[in-house]
């Protein structure tokens, strides 16, 4: 038999020979099984095993899981009452059960619980245990009280400010008490911020050391685990019962016990296998995972135990209780499949007892464990997998035992051809477009999955969602053909499924058999109906179909998730094997009395119904089911057969070939053959170009394009392993799919970051760049490598202006050298960008050497290669030397003070720890930053030793599933369950400790790819083959650590031999002495040559090769030498010093020909642009500091046409003599907003540089966006003398503290800076605060309170200890009444794009000033409340200062007009609607309540919603700010319902409510203004006088203008004047008519600006004039209001100045198509033009130019055109784990698609039972429960979930059983 088996296996796949036959008289092997169902053998309950000496096998263990204090009195608690509770599962009685896994919960911020004891006892100690979730619900302030009668209470102990270290943490408190009380009460006076209070246990103790007596370990049959991430609650793995084991340690040290379960008599044969399922609970959140120290043991009749025979499980872990726990083999809160071939160690023995063992070597007194067993089986002759077909080793269900709350792959069980056009999958939820196949979670009441159809799918991931999906469900007999898919569902068992790439087959419980097999664009389905059924029907779902009487079917499908970008309609054509006897629009019925089989062939197309028919004929028509399957099998044999293994177990074979299957599923073809089989013509419906029409029932409206395109790939997910794996294993396939993504660029202009199938705006990095570079560098013959390179360069150098393509933040990151925090997930964007730059640089270098590259391009490629490789080292700019981590950094250069344990924020799907090593392209440089290789090694050791506890959501605001999966990895901080961590185990190679890489890699492969038998197989999302490819490549012993190069790191191969079959030459990896013990590399040879380095150049394997490993059980010195590390960009031991720009804000001055200000070209931003004054202009830069020697420079083209084509770069030290450093002729900028690098031909050290343009192409004058001069090494950017530059436009308010930047400083020695500030009001000089503003530029700020209004001239002086400089700063101090509204302002809600100055909801969202102005609300202008007589004015508040009042309890003096009869508050609520009450105070001293009720500022994300409380919309903003970027939500400003002032009353003030709780969750009101219906007083106004002249030393009697309007006080107006010469402001003489005058003597000649400020009781007004002023000329300039942004189709307002009086000025907006208007300049040379954009203008950044007919000098600005904001669409999905049951049934509810972190209400029936839960950071609800109330009536009802923010409601049916 062994020989026969080996003959059937493919070449290279060898299995071990079976053991010799047993003796002839040996008993045949026996069998046993029990799933603990009532019909199964039943175990003994809690029966302790007794050893051969009669001693119980139990020590330091008790069967109780209660965690109690010594001397506990919980046993004396006779009754428990509480102020409130949440029955039936979260009641006060749970506090006294000692079980941390249960809890008491009350829907209030405070609460109390009372224990009544059976007898009075003196309590001197108590303990509180935190509950399982939401730390904000924990008690914070509480008092313990005692009472003798339950009525009169005595305080015994009071605690405030308490917190718990983690979930389930127990805090113990001791106090002095000698009185025996019969009652004890815990009074919680404050929780930690939530609206709910909860606690797990409250223990009380008499202070003694007595503990309850030990009991046997508990082993008893129960209903199964109630929790769990992926399982159906309250059942076993199979069936309805399972065995529960539980207990706890009594003290520190080893804790063990063995219980007998069954007495048996089972002979063991040579192939006998033991298997079982085990569910260790995550008991008490204990991260030592005590419940995993459990295993089945066997006792043999000879007195020995299986645990003593060195048996291992299927993954090589010791099959002992201690071995399973110590090896971390089991996952908590999930079912685990364990099996062992015990015949290898126990053949010939007889099992007489089946036992359960627990053995925890390192237990503590607090250790408690609980778990479940199911499906114990002993099999004498297990059936091996038939290896004659490699597809038999593939189980497509791997990864399907997942949910949105925890991923073990999150896959669909897809049957398809490799990289196929369509997927075929069974579905257990045909209505879902995400989780369509549930392995276990949604089983029916019998704990069986139910089939709802066989489906066509295109789902790349459940998170991306499906599109163009349809399903077919067979229905036997007279079953329902209408209704929901659930109404037709039929149960099945997973054992009755065949789930393989070439075939899916299932036998349903009703006897029906459903099968399907795929082709590329088509497939075949076969249904065998059960005998006795005269008819069988097929029901079609999710489409529009026509079923013909001739047995044909046509139709179309048009559905898709919100992330299905670029999808278009799918068309269907199919044929049955015979005509139906009856049909409808959705069903076909067949006579199956004689022939029970019905076969259907079905094809799809995205082009047309006719093309679907062509696809059907090309691939399926005339082919039988077996023929189609055989073709699919052959296709998979080609892919799977590329890899051959020796030394692999059956479990490893399943893992390897199932992983190869997942790798080869994606990406997918979306092209179709519109020609013939002999002469194909490939075309596709474009997912990346705009549609050309509207789809009809028969033909697409999408653009049809020639060529082959591939889709369904997220490059962030796949670049690390999938693309390298294709390049190494399948170079022929890699060439084809690579070009399929280059087709995205040819067609749509960009390669998708996430193709699903078009441009989805998701994830960070343009990682197609490095993926395609990897393919080219690995020897893949790309059809068009230059186009692939061009696409990458465009990503890396062009600002797209579109969020879905290109690199976010590139407008500034290119010039800063890093992505600032103004871009979300900035660290991820930056570090991923540097990896992509590395790949681009290497690809450019290789292309320059490629003989196929045109010679005309090679020098440019060399030049660009060096530039991109320099950029690849820019990671140094994000390395914070203080924290030794990569941290977020703002545009000024200041690092964020982030905690590396916090997830999200500046990091994508991980935390700072997991980004601490993301510079693998330059490992030596990274090591140098840490302090050398040893320091890097120490950092890695710390990383692997710091546990991930999934309790630091950081920027996500709530737990996301990736956090839970990372915790389950149990390798410190290593989040191996997600991509950012996948390279980290190999970083030990870089640190000179390759043995640690080898150990970590082998542990990952052994532990984290398990569970294939039960739908698991992965930990974390599998993600388009990425998880699978990591395993495949790591099994080879090599890994693409430095993506984008040919350098692969060496790890530890998994098998004795692994061969990759390739036509270009096989790659063979030999490790003959490999084993689970021999994981350490002792020696390596490559192609027979000894290899010392830990990196291998895969270029040596392009034509095949051999790698020979010598393995051993201990670490060796191999690979630890100084020169053995992988190659790096950085050489030596110094930190990298990449190129950086020596220009920038504050570092010098820039001018262009004719004195034109050119600062826009050196401001580190390409959004500001400049059109130069002629076709041959010059742009000059004069450095403020010392001489510099740039070696590169960059030019960035403008948004509009007009580029420099020929130029010279020159340098000078005196501005007279210029040296030419570089010359260019005929240069071309291929794209708008493109940054091109140029290497300087003859570098020199100069203080001045200029660009001399000698030829312009594309327009009359060139437009530039940015110029950089790049130098490397040690740079002193701010060198030279100290220079202080004043800040323009500083504003303050009298009587209020002002903390603002006053000036910037450069030069000198920055580490010695000290600043002082004279505030200009006669007050003492104060110290200034210095912070980094931009590269080498520091900001000086200070805090001061001006007592009186007026303009002040502050003086800022900075010294570095050897020199100093100063500057005068104008501070305009406005007046506001002390008790007025502005004095109550405490929050900044209005911000500006690009400035982190506003945070309205404490979660970084804010109103946009520009968007509010566009909506019609401008501070300082009076606005009416629509539909009322009310009007209001938003106060003018300087940017960055508080602009609204929250519920802070402040009293606001109103100063209403005397005829005002009603008021309204202008503002909004955050975190939902806010209903509060203030206090109105009247002039007679009386008060009244006044409602202040404000709707949520986004109406719950519904831009078309209706406000609550009678609120009136006064402004609807087009967008919101999130940090410094835009957010899609549209915030409102409301006016509250008018408050009518009681007749005869005068309202003088309103006191705001005092709101408490965390504003991030509880929310706040925000009051910006108060509207009234009174007659407004005339506006206060100051009128400036004519300019005046004075003589130095002589008194000037000055006319200072006049003041009028406003509301003067009883003493009239007040006014002050600041004379502009640095003196303090002085009082002004005010005449009866309002005339202002004053006297002043100037000491020196000059020109001074005089500021006069007057104020009344409410406001101030300032005007200015000059004394001896000279007025200069000006140049044309234009500006766009607000942030320079506009929505497609809206008008752009352009303001200009500096034009000739009366000249015609042409304004052009460079959208496609462009828009032009002409206006006349005013007499002062100003213009204002409104230019509408095209309604179909694509989003992006465009040039705006204004050119005068006579001045002829264009003025340039840019505008950001954005698409119409789409309100976020939330479509929650909900599943009930139980759909029927009697009163008291606990229903477990899962949901997804809610707003992240929103409150969700779960209601049973007509709100008979209501529960509030919170969605996690993914918008997921997992394992929530609601109980069928006793008042429920029998019959049909529903469970309804309602999201508080999404305002969506989802109901699911439930049937209450029992008597009505």
Image (spheres, rainbow, N blue to C red):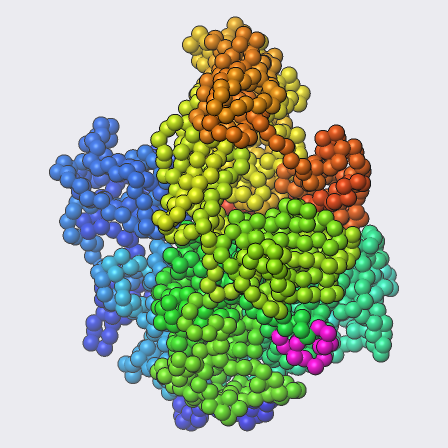
Q: Residue visible at 78% across and 50% down?
A: 1712
Between residues 651 and 1079, which one lies in front from this camera angle?
Answer: 1079
Between residues 770 and 24, which one lies in front from this camera angle?
Answer: 770
Between residues 1092 and 1077, which one lies in front from this camera angle?
Answer: 1092
Tell me if residue 1537 comes above or below residue 1129 in the rendering.
above
In the image, residue 845 lies in the stretch drawn in magenta: yes
* Magenta stretch in the rendered image: 844-857
Q: Quadrant of the C terminus?
A: top right
Which percent across, then down, holds residue 230?
A: 50, 59
Is residue 1539 visible in the rendered image? The answer is no
Which percent across, then down, holds residue 316?
A: 41, 78
Q: Residue visible at 50% across and 62% down?
A: 875
Tell me if residue 1675 comes above or below residue 728 in the rendering.
above
Q: Residue visible at 61% across and 84% down?
A: 1102
Q: Residue furthest top?
A: 1544
Which percent across, then down, holds residue 1594?
A: 49, 21
Answer with left or right where residue 1023 lies relative to residue 1122: right
The tally of labels here is 0
Tell me if residue 1381 comes above or below residue 827 in the rendering.
above
Answer with left or right where residue 1534 lies relative to residue 330: right
Which image quarter: residue 666? bottom right
Between residues 1507 and 521, which one lies in front from this camera angle?
Answer: 1507
Q: Main secondary structure of the magenta part?
A: helix
In the image, residue 201 lies in the stretch drawn in magenta: no
């Amino acid at each position: 038999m062994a020989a026969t088996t080996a003959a059937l296996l493919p070449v290279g796949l060898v299995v071990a020979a079976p053991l010799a036959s047993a003796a002839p008289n040996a008993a045949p092997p026996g069998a046993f099984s029990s799933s603990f169902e009532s019909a199964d053998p039943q175990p003994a309950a809690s029966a302790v095993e007794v050893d051969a000496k009669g001693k119980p096998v139990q020590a330091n263990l008790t069967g109780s899981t209660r965690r109690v204090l010594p001397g506990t009195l919980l046993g004396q608690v006779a009754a428990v009452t509480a102020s409130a509770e949440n029955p039936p599962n979260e009641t006060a009685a749970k506090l006294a059960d000692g079980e941390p896994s249960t809890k008491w919960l009350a829907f209030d911020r405070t609460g109390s619980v009372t224990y009544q004891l059976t007898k009075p006892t003196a309590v001197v100690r108590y303990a509180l245990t935190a509950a399982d979730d939401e730390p904000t619900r924990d008690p914070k302030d509480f008092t313990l009280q005692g009472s003798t009668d339950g009525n009169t209470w005595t305080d015994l102990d009071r605690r405030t400010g308490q917190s718990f270290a983690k979930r389930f943490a127990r805090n113990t408190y001791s106090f002095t008490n000698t009185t025996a009380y019969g009652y004890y009460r815990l009074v919680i006076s404050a929780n930690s911020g939530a609206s709910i209070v909860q606690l797990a246990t409250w223990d009380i103790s008499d202070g003694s050391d007595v503990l309850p007596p030990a009991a046997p370990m508990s082993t008893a049959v129960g209903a199964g685990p109630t929790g769990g991430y992926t399982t159906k609650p309250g059942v076993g793995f199979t069936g309805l019962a399972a065995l529960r084991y539980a207990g706890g340690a009594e003290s520190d040290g080893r804790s063990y016990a063995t219980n007998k379960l069954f007495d048996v008599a089972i002979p063991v044969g040579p192939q006998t296998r033991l298997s079982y399922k085990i569910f260790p609970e995550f008991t008490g959140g204990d991260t030592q995972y005590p419940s995993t120290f459990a295993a089945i043991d066997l006792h043999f009749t000879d007195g020995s135990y299986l645990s003593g025979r060195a048996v291992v499980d299927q993954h090589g872990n010791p099959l002992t209780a201690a071995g399973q726990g110590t090896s971390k083999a089991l996952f908590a809160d999930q079912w685990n499949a364990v099996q062992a071939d015990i015949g290898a160690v126990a053949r010939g023995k007889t099992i007489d007892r089946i036992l359960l063992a627990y053995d925890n070597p390192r237990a503590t007194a607090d250790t408690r464990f609980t778990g479940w067993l199911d499906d114990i089986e002993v099999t004498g002759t297990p059936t091996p997998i038939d290896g004659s077909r490699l597809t038999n080793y593939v189980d497509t269900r791997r990864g399907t035992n997942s949910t949105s709350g925890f991923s073990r792959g999150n896959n669909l069980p897809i049957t398809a051809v490799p990289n196929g056009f369509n997927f075929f999958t069974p579905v257990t939820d045909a209505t879902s477009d995400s989780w369509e196949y549930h392995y276990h979670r949604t089983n029916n009441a019998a704990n069986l999955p139910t089939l709802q159809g066989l489906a066509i799918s295109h789902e790349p991931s459940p998170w991306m969602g499906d599109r163009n999906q349809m399903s077919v469900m067979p229905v036997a007999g007279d079953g329902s053909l209408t209704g929901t898919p659930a109404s037709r569902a039929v149960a099945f068992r997973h054992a009755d499924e065949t789930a393989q790439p070439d075939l899916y087959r299932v036998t349903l419980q009703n006897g029906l058999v459903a099968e399907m097999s795929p082709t590329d664009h088509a497939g075949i389905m076969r249904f065998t109906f059960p005998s006795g059924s005269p008819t069988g029907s097929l029901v079609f779902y999710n489409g529009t179909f026509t079923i013909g009487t001739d047995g044909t079917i046509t139709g179309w499908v048009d559905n898709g998730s919100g992330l299905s970008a670029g999808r278009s309609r799918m068309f269907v054509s199919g044929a049955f094997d015979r005509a139906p006897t009856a049909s409808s629009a959705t069903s076909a019925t067949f006579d199956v009395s004689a022939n029970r089989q019905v076969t259907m062939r079905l094809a799809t197309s995205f082009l047309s119904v006719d093309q679907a028919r062509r696809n059907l004929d090309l691939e399926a028509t005339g082919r039988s089911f077996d023929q189609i399957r055989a073709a699919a099998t052959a296709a998979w044999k080609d892919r799977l057969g590329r890899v051959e293994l020796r030394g692999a177990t059956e479990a490893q074979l399943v893992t390897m070939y199932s992983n190869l299957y997942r790798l080869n599923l994606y990406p997918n073809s979306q092209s179709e053959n519109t020609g013939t089989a002999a002469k194909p013509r490939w075309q596709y419906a474009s997912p990346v170009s705009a549609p050309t029409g509207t789809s009809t029932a028969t033909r697409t409206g999408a653009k049809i394009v020639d060529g082959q395109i591939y889709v369904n790939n997220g490059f962030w997910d796949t670049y690390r392993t999938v693309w390298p794996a294709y390049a190494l294993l399948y170079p022929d396939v890699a060439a084809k799919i690579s070009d399929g993504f280059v087709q995205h660029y040819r067609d749509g202009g960009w390669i998708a970051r996430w193709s699903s199938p078009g441009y989805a705006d998701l994830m960070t990095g343009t990682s197609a760049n490095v993926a395609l570079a990897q393919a080219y560098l690995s020897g893949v013959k790309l059809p068009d490598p230059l186009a692939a390179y061009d696409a990458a360069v465009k990503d890396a150098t062009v600002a797209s202006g579109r969020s879905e393509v290109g690199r976010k933040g590139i407008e500034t990151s290119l010039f800063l050298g890093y992505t600032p925090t103004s871009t979300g997930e900035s660290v991820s964007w930056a570090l991923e960008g540097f990896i992509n730059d590395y790949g681009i640089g290497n690809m450019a270098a290789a292309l320059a050497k490629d003989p196929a590259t045109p010679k005309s391009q090679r020098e440019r490629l060399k030049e660009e290669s060096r530039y991109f490789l320099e950029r690849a080292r820019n990671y140094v700019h994000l390395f914070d030397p203080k924290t030794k981590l990569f941290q977020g950094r703002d545009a000024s250069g200041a690092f964020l003070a982030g905690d590396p344990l916090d997830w999200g924020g500046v990091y994508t799907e991980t935390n700072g720890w997991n980004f601490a090593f993301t510079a693998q392209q330059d490992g030596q440089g990274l090591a140098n930053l840490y302090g050398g290789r040893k320091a890097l090694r120490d950092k890695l050791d710390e990383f692997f030793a710091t546990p991930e506890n999934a309790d630091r959501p950081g920027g996500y605001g709530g737990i996301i599933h990736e956090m839970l999966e990372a915790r389950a990895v149990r390798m410190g901080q290593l989040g191996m369950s997600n991509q950012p961590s996948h390279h980290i185990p190999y970083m030990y190679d870089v640190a000179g400790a390759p043995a640690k890489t080898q150990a970590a890699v082998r542990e990952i492969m052994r532990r984290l790819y398990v569970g294939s038998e039960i739908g698991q197989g992965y930990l974390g999302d599998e993600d388009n083959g990425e998880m699978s490819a990591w395993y495949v490549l790591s099994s080879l012993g090599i890994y693409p650590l430095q993506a984008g190069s040919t350098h692969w790191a060496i790890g530890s191969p998994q098998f004795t031999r692994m061969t990759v079959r390739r036509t270009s030459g096989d790659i063979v990896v030999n490790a003959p002495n490999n084993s689970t013990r021999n994981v350490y590399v002792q020696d390596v040879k490559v192609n027979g040559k000894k290899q010392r380095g830990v990196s291998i150049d895969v270029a040596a394997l392009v034509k095949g090769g051999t790698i020979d490993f010598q393995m051993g059980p201990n670490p060796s010195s191999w690979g630890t030498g100084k020169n053995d590390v992988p190659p790096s960009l950085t050489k030596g031991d110094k930190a990298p010093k990449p190129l950086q720009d020596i220009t920038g804000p504050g570092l010098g001055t820039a001018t262009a020909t004719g004195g034109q200000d050119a600062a826009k070209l050196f401001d580190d931003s390409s959004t500001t642009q400049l059109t130069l004054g002629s076709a041959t202009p010059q742009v000059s830069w004069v450095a403020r500091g010392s001489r510099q020697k740039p070696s590169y420079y960059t030019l960035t083209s403008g948004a509009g046409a007009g580029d420099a084509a020929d130029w010279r770069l020159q340098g000078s030290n005196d501005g007279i003599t210029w040296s030419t450093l570089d010359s260019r002729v005929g240069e071309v900028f291929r794209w708008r907003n493109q940054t091109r690098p140029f290497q300087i031909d003859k570098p020199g050290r100069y203080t001045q540089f200029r660009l001399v343009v000698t030829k312009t192409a594309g327009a009359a004058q060139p437009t530039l966006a940015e110029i950089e001069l790049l130098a490397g090494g040690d740079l002193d950017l701010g060198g030279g003398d100290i220079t202080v530059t004043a800040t323009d436009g500083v504003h303050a308010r009298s009587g209020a503290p002002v903390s603002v930047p006053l000036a910037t400083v450069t030069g000198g020695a920055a580490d010695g800076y000290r600043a002082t500030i004279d505030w200009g009001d006669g007050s003492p000089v104060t110290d200034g605060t210095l912070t980094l503003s931009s590269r080498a530029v520091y900001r000086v700020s200070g805090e001061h309170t001006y007592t009186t209004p007026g303009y002040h001239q502050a003086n800022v002086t900075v010294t570095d200890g050897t020199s100093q400089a100063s500057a005068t700063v104008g501070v305009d101090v406005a007046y506001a009444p002390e008790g007025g509204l502005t004095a109550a302002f405490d929050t900044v809600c209005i911000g500006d794009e690009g400035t982190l100055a506003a945070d309205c909801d404490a979660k970084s969202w804010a109103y946009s000033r520009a968007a509010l102005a566009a909506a019609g609300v401008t501070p300082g202008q009076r606005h009416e409340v629509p539909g009322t007589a009310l009007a209001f004015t938003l106060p003018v508040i300087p940017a960055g200062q508080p602009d609204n009042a929250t519920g802070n309890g402040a009293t606001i003096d109103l100063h209403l007009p005397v005829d005002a009869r009603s008021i309204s508050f202008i503002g909004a609520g955050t975190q939902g609607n806010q209903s509060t009450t203030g206090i109105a105070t009247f002039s007679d001293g009386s008060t009244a309540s006044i409602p202040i009720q404000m709707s949520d500022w986004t109406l719950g994300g519904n831009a078309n919603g209706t406000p609550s409380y009678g609120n009136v919309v006064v402004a609807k903003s087009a967008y919101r700010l999130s940090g410094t970027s835009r957010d899609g939500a549209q915030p409102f400003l409301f006016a509250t319902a008018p408050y009518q002032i009681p007749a005869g009353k005068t309202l003088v003030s309103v006191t705001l409510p005092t709101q408490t709780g965390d504003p991030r969750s509880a929310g706040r009101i925000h009051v910006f203004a108060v509207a009234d219906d009174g007659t407004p007083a005339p506006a206060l106004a100051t009128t400036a006088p004519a300019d005046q002249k004075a003589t130095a030393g002589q008194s000037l009697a000055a006319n200072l203008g006049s003041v009028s309007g406003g509301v003067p006080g009883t003493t009239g107006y007040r006014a002050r004047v600041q004379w502009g010469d640095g003196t303090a402001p002085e009082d002004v003489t005010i005449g009866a008519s309002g005339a202002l005058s004053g006297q002043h003597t100037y000491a020196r000649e000059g020109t001074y600006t005089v500021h006069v400020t007057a104020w009344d009781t409410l406001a101030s007004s300032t005007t200015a004039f000059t004394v001896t002023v000279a007025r200069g000329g000006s140049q044309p300039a234009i500006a766009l209001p607000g942030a320079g942004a506009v929505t497609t189709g809206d008008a752009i307002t352009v303001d200009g100045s500096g034009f000739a009086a009366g000249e015609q000025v042409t304004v052009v907006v460079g959208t496609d198509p462009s828009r032009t208007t002409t206006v006349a300049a005013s007499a002062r040379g100003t213009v204002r033009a409104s230019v509408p954009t095209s309604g179909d203008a694509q989003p992006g950044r465009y040039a705006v130019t204004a050119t005068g007919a006579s001045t002829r000098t264009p003025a340039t600005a840019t505008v950001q055109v954005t698409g119409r904001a789409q309100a976020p669409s939330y479509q929650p999905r909900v599943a009930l784990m139980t759909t029927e049951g009697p009163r008291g049934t606990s229903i477990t509810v899962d949901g997804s698609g809610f707003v992240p972190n929103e409150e969700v209400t779960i209601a049973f029936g007509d709100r008979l039972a209501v529960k509030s839960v919170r969605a996690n950071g993914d918008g997921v609800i997992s394992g929530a429960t609601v109980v069928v109330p006793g008042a429920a009536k029998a019959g049909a009802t529903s469970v309804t979930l309602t999201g508080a923010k999404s305002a969506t409601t989802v109901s699911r049916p439930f049937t209450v059983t029992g008597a009505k």
